[in-house]
Image (tube, rainbow, N blue to C red):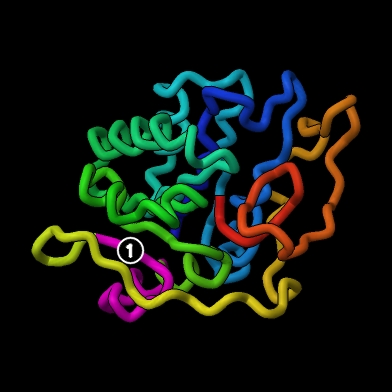
Amino acid sequence: MKIVLINPPHTAIGSRVPDDHLPPLGLLAIGGPLIDAGHQVRLVDAEFGPMPLDDVVRSALEDHPDFVLIGHSGSTSAHPTALVIARMIKEREPATIIIYGGVFPTYHWRDILAATDAFDFIVRGEGEATVVALIEGLEMRQPPASVAGIAYRDDLSRPFATQAAMTIADLDAYRVGWELIDHPSYSYWGGKRAVVMQFSRGCPHLCNYCGQRGFWT
């Protein structure tokens, strides 16, 4: 399947501090398992520029992907932009399935799904295993209710969440898709180039600042 990952342009601090660009670690964390599952995966990092939303959508849809996955490390303040992007994609390519993930949608899936039909599915919590299971299930036309850790609208258009997915016990079981980015384009504060970070589980939030991989963003 063709899959596009979108890192939305942020309206606040985002991944630009102020001009350095941090890798979208959450998206890369799900990109690796998707590639290893045999899917064609591409990243649109709209933080560069930042990209105008028309350009973001045009770039995302240029090869007619089957799925678009949207997430951002600052998922609360980035939600309005993610929503606009999702709506624009649905207007141009209604059949494209949009999956949303991050800290904000993890906790606010019910409100999001009740307020808009722009997002088809929400991944709650860690996304490495869940998003692979979701896409493979949809590809095989299995009922989404069989996939743990997601939320969607049921046949009556009501927000519905499946049982929580199990926490990943072995972080090394899922590799980061570093091949999705052009490494020289990214840096940390002070001009230092991006480095592989040691992931830990000490914080309930996932952000680029500590490298936590507890949620997909």
Quarter of the image where the N terminus is located = bottom left
Residue 112, above or below 124: above
| Label 1 residue SS | strand
Residue marked by disc 1: 151
146 drawn magenta = yes
For the point 33% across and 63% down, the residue is 151
Image position, residue 59 (x, y; %): 47, 32
**Rendered image quadrant of residue 18:** top right
Q: Residue at x 13, y 58 (%)?
A: 157
- Going by the image, does 95 lie left or right of 51? left
Left or right, residue 165 beside residue 109: right
Q: Residue at x 41, y 67 (%)?
A: 135
Residue 152: x and y in percent read: 27, 61
Q: What span is in magenta?
A: 135-152
75 magenta-colored: no
Q: Residue at x 50, y 51 (%)?
A: 102
Relative image position of residue 42 (x, y in whole percent): 56, 47
Q: Closer to the camera, 23 or 60?
A: 23
The number of callouts visible is 1
Image position of 137 with respect to 15: above or below: below
Farthest residue in the left direction?
A: 156
Count residues near mark 1 (Cα–Cα under 10 Å), then give few for <14, some for 14-19, many for 20+: many
Instruction: Name which residue type carries label 1.
Output: Ala
